Image: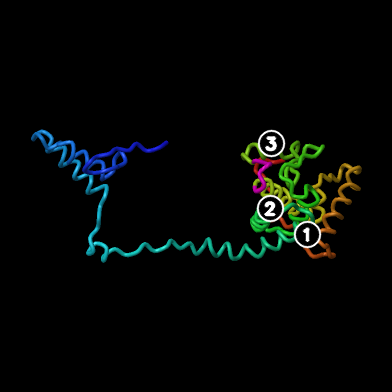
């Protein structure tokens, strides 16, 4: 919308509204000072002008100190420490066919969740590549969704109760990492990865599928024998129970 303009032979052109030039025009050129009843209005308007349009003198300027920039050392420290790890995971994802559109966001979420749950970020990234190639909207025929293919019949209730959006990259990776940590704490690393894929010891038909899945993850991860300790202390069991207060 174009501003309204006014013209005065004395004041020339000006914008209509609450601005210094227009208010002075109304005071001086419209003869508001014609009777004593309007002197109060003049005083009020003059005060408003001084408040709204202050013009500090040289002495005021000389005593003012320039505003110092706000420093956030803790945030900068976090960025510096996380940065190289994020770049490393991002390169790993890119080298294995994950699209550029969400690669940085995926890498950042992987690193944050890995640190939160004390997991290897490369392991999480390997699982994501096998599960979805980093597609946040992936949906399988087994009703698993998102980048880490969270299985809705198993985990949907917990996700809904906690207000987790499984199509959001950060939420999906954090929840998936929590599930993975739970299984690893109970069964060890690669047995935990098998459970993440849906393996149940009571179901012999799931053994071959789960084993194939683990091998795919290991090939990406460049698995070497026994890099991790196998299960589990009673303390780890307690941590595992705390990860999912609502159960499976």
Chief SS of the magenta region: loop
Colouring method of the image: rainbow
Left/right placement of residue 125 relative to residue 209 reads left
Q: At x 26% / y 41%, what residue is drawn? A: 22
The numbered disc on residue 157 is 3
User: Which residue occupies the extreme left position in the image?
Assistant: 36
Mark 1–mark 2 distance (CA, rounded to whole Å): 14 Å
Q: At x 81% / y 38%, what residue is drawn? A: 142
Quick one: SS at disc 3? helix
Left/right placement of residue 161 relative to residue 17 reads right
Taking depth in this image into account, of 202 and 62 the one nearest to the observer is 62
The residue wearing badge 1 is 95
Q: At x 75% / y 57%, what residue is drawn? A: 94
Magenta residues, start to end: 165-170
Residue neighbourhood size for the residue with mark 1, other residues' Cα within 10 Å, grouped as few (<14), some (14–19), many (≥20): few
- From the image, state whether disc 3 or disc 2 is nearer to you: 2
The residue wearing badge 2 is 106
- From the image, state whether disc 1 or disc 2 is nearer to you: 1
Q: At x 26% / y 49%, what residue is drawn? A: 53
Quick one: SS at disc 1? helix
Percent across and percent down for residue 119 are 71, 58
> Is 135 in the magenta?
no
Quadrant of the image containing the N terminus = top left
Percent across and percent down for residue 52 are 27, 47
Mark 3–mark 1 distance (CA, rounded to whole Å): 35 Å
């Amino acid at each position: 919308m174009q501003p309204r303009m006014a013209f005065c032979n004395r004041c020339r052109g000006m914008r209509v509204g609450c601005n210094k030039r227009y208010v002075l025009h109304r005071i001086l050129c419209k003869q508001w000072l014609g009777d004593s009843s309007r002197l109060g209005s003049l005083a009020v308007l003059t005060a408003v002008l001084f408040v709204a349009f202050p013009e500090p003198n040289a002495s005021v300027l000389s005593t003012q100190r320039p505003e110092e920039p706000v420093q956030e050392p803790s945030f900068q420290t976090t960025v510096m420490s996380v940065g190289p790890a994020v770049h490393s995971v991002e390169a790993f994802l890119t080298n294995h066919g994950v699209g550029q559109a969400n690669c940085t966001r995926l890498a950042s979420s992987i690193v944050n969740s890995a640190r939160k749950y004390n997991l290897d970020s490369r392991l999480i990234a390997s699982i994501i590549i096998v599960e979805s190639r980093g597609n946040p909207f992936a949906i399988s025929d087994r009703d698993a969704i998102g980048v880490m293919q969270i299985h809705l019949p198993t985990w949907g209730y917990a996700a809904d109760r906690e207000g987790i959006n499984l199509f959001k990259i950060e939420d999906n990776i954090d929840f998936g990492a929590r599930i993975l940590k739970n299984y690893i704490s109970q069964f060890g690393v690669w047995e935990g990865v098998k459970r993440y894929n849906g393996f149940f010891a009571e179901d012999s038909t799931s053994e071959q599928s789960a084993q194939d899945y683990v091998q795919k993850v290991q090939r990406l991860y460049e698995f070497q024998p026994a890099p991790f300790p196998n299960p589990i202390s009673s303390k780890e069991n307690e941590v595992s129970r705390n990860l999912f207060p609502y159960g499976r």
